[in-house]
Image (cartoon, rainbow, N blue to C red):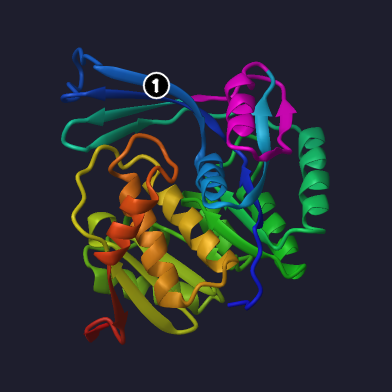
Amino acid sequence: MQSSKTTKVVTITLNPALDLTGSMSELNVGSVSLVSQSNLHAAGKGVNVAKVLSDLGAQVTVTGFLGKDNPELFHQLFSQIDVVDSFIEVEGATRINVKLVEESGRVSDINFPGVQVTQEDIAKFEKVLFRLAEDHDYFVIAGSLPGGVSPDLCASWIAQLRKQGKKVMFDSSKSALAAGLSSQPWLIKPNDEELSELVGQHLTSAEQCQSAAETLSDKGIENIVVSMGAQGVMWLSQGEWLRATPPKMSVVSTVGAGDTLVAGMCWGHMQAMPRKELLRFATALSAMAVSQVGVGLTSQKELDNIKLNTQIKEICSSTNVKAN
């Protein structure tokens, strides 16, 4: 970990979305479900990360692709959270994703395809990206890919940034994540389901997740963060494992909790926090996210309290765990 601190970071959302979130007592599949509360807001994994980082005090530049037909809510959000907007606007409308949140805490996601990106759009984006690389060291690439951006193209961007000595945090899934690994991003954050898909094996325990993550570490990934929901977070770095377990939270919505974890890990590194302090902070921040609707640092006092009750353990192997 570098000793110098920075507040400058770029978040990249290649396939953002307007999230239509509906709260209900229970989803009746194949029948009528009544929504008690609804909200339409600008989102996308990288956009969520940007909001949390801005709340923490970062100087954030956001980029990616936005549809020209409906950018207003994004522009409003970027102004509200005081980030630099370097998005490329392309033909068409940014997609709307539907998230149905039940009282039990279960969330059903209905994700639509995004805009279709042209070669001209890609050239504009690359110009912005590598201009930003001139004076930024941290890059977060988060979310899925739009039409026109292949997994291999995204991987090539990671590789170019890495060659320039940039710290690239890559949070994606499926073929995009699989291709991106070949470019050795500095940090990845699969959840247990994404990790299972990545290694082609159904992982049901923390020990199995450990073993799977270690195979990825052998490919040259410096930081592997595995999120396991209420079971906490595991982090493999420089051959050493840490595991954080947050206190039991009253779950309002899990939407954005993973993005909040990425933001916490990013900010902790940017502020050169010691490893255990960093993981405790990021895990507590993510745990706080499930107790609210939307992402962001809503209460420093609550965050501090969750941090005090978040346990950190050093994991020596998949079978031997010692308390800290």
Q: Residue at x 82, y 34 (%)?
A: 120
Q: Is residue 32 above or below residue 79?
A: above
Instruction: Tell me: 21 left or right of 92.
Output: left
Q: Quadrant of residue 309?
A: bottom left
Q: Is residue 97 above or below residue 204?
A: above
Q: Amino acid at mark 1?
A: Asn
**Label 1 crowd (10 A; few <14 / some 14-19 / many >=20):** few
| Residue 94 included in the magenta stretch of the image | yes
Q: In this view of the protein, which residue sits in the foreground, 288 or 159? A: 288
Q: Nearer the viewer, residue 135 or 225?
A: 135
Secondary structure of residue under mark 1: strand
Position of the C terminus, as image quadrant, is bottom left
Q: Position of residue 211 (x, y in %)?
A: 34, 76
Q: Residue at coordinates 66% horizontally, 74% vertically from top-left?
A: 4
Location of residue 46 (image quadrant): top right
Specify whether residue 196 is in view. Answer: no
* Residues drawn in magenta: 69-96
The answer to whether residue 91 is seen in the rendering is yes
Is 99 drawn above or below residue 192 in the view shown?
Answer: above
Side (left or right) of 101 relative to 86: left
User: Residue 245 in the image: x percent, y percent?
Assistant: 26, 65
Give percent across and percent down for residue 2.
63, 77
Is-magenta flag for residue 143? no
78 relative to 111 in the view: left or right: right
Please state, as top left, top right, bottom left or bottom right, where the N terminus lies in the image: bottom right
Where residue 259 sits in the image (x, y, percent)?
Answer: 45, 48
Q: Residue furthest front?
A: 301
Name the residue: 51% across, 65% down. Answer: 268
As displayed, is residue 271 above or below residue 79?
A: below
- Residue under numbered circle 1: 39
> In the rendered picture of this protein, how many numbered marks are placed on residues?
1
Q: In the picture provided, is 212 more to the left or to the right than 272?
A: left
